[in-house]
Image (spheres, rainbow, N blue to C red):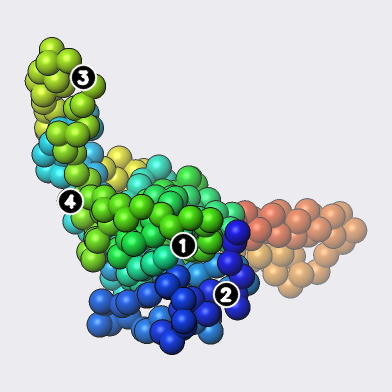
């Protein structure tokens, strides 16, 4: 059964008389305290992203997902006050501000907030949040748009839905059950169970190579294209503005020397052309300023 707002508030109450309990702690001293008035909705709890995260390096020919040192393929990122740009197709991993602890006959289900999904921002989480876990939430954030998207620290990107369950869950302790800070992926020997010795040896022989023409950030192919397109649109915009000014001067000259019936037609045509140039220039400026290509 999904818990509504009143039940969630009851579970958050330190003085509740039940074993079922939600505890939310904030370890980031720069973040505002958890606010149940604004973060608890009708049937969920809004969860904020923190400042620290990581992303996978893009300067390898491939990534061995079964490498027990897989964390070497990632590097840290920080989301500053001015925000962090996620480029099209890019994925970053960010930890939550809230550290959530669930106790008793309740479990959590994490899901993205609809308003940001409608912007093309995909926010995936480890869907199930186990009871007896005491950990930060891991956000996988991907930009599905053709335009760069900017996110900000402490933005509410996901929501935690609380379910009550019939029986007391097992006191499971996974690798990330007590993750007070976001950690990089962990590949243990358990992942090799069920594989033959030959398969394991084959996997361990797969060593990726570093690509000299790529950077670990991976956006070098995208940024120059934006700069090139923006420069092109700037030049076209300036040309159109000059044409508009010249045509406006011609109209002024015609009006100054007196016009006949044939000149009126010319002035109307020039006026229409100027209007089109102004509209096109405005559209180009908007596209350029918002990096839409």
Q: Earlier in the sequence, mark 3 or mark 2?
A: 2
- Crowdedness of circle 2 by 10 Å Cα count: few (<14), some, many (20+)? some
Q: Nearer the viewer, residue 279 or 33?
A: 33
- Nearer to us of marks 3 and 2 is 2
Q: Which residue is mark 3?
A: 195
Q: Is residue 91 above or below residue 61?
A: below
- Looking at the rendered structure, the secondary structure element under dot 1 is loop
Residue drawn at (74%, 72%) of the image: 256
The label shown at residue 75 is 4
- For residue 119, say whether it is visible: no
Q: Which residue is mark 1?
A: 105
The quarter of the displayed image where residue 23 is located: bottom left
Position of 61 compared to 38: left or right? left
Q: Earlier in the sequence, mark 4 or mark 3?
A: 4
Residue 8, horizontal then vertical, whole percent: 53, 74
Q: Is residue 257 above or below residue 64?
A: below
Residue drawn at (12%, 16%) of the image: 197
Q: CA distance from mark 2 to mark 1?
A: 13 Å
Q: CA distance from mark 3 to mark 2?
A: 46 Å
Q: Are marks 1 and 4 in contact (CB under 8 Å)?
A: no
- Nearer to us of marks 2 and 1 is 1
Q: Nearer the viewer, residue 282 or 97?
A: 97
Q: Earlier in the sequence, mark 2 or mark 1?
A: 2
Q: Which residue is mark 2?
A: 7
């Amino acid at each position: 059964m999904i818990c509504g707002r009143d039940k969630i508030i009851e579970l958050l109450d330190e003085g509740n008389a039940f074993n079922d309990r939600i505890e939310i702690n904030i370890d980031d001293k720069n973040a505002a305290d958890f606010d149940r008035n604004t973060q608890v909705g009708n049937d969920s709890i809004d969860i904020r992203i923190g400042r620290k995260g990581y992303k996978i390096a893009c300067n390898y020919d491939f990534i061995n997902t079964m490498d027990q040192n897989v964390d070497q393929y990632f590097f840290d990122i920080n989301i500053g006050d001015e925000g962090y740009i996620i480029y099209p197709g890019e994925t970053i991993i960010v930890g939550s501000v809230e550290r959530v602890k669930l106790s008793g006959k309740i479990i959590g289900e994490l899901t993205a907030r609809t308003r940001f999904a409608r912007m093309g921002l995909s926010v995936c989480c480890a869907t199930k949040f186990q009871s007896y876990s005491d950990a930060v939430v891991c956000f996988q954030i991907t930009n599905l748009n053709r335009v760069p998207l900017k996110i900000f620290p402490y933005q509410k990107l996901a929501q935690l839905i609380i379910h009550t369950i019939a029986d007391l869950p097992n006191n499971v302790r996974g690798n990330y059950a007590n993750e007070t800070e976001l950690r990089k992926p962990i590949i243990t020997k358990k992942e090799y169970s069920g594989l033959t010795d030959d398969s394991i040896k084959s996997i361990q022989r797969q060593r990726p190579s570093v690509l000299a023409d790529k950077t670990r950030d991976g956006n070098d192919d995208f940024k120059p294209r934006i700069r090139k397109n923006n420069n092109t649109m700037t030049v076209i915009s300036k040309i159109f503005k000059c044409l508009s000014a010249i045509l406006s001067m011609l109209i002024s000259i015609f009006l100054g020397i007196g016009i006949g019936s044939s000149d009126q037609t010319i002035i109307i045509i020039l006026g229409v052309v100027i209007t089109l140039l102004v509209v096109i220039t405005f559209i180009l400026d908007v596209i350029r300023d918002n990096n839409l290509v």
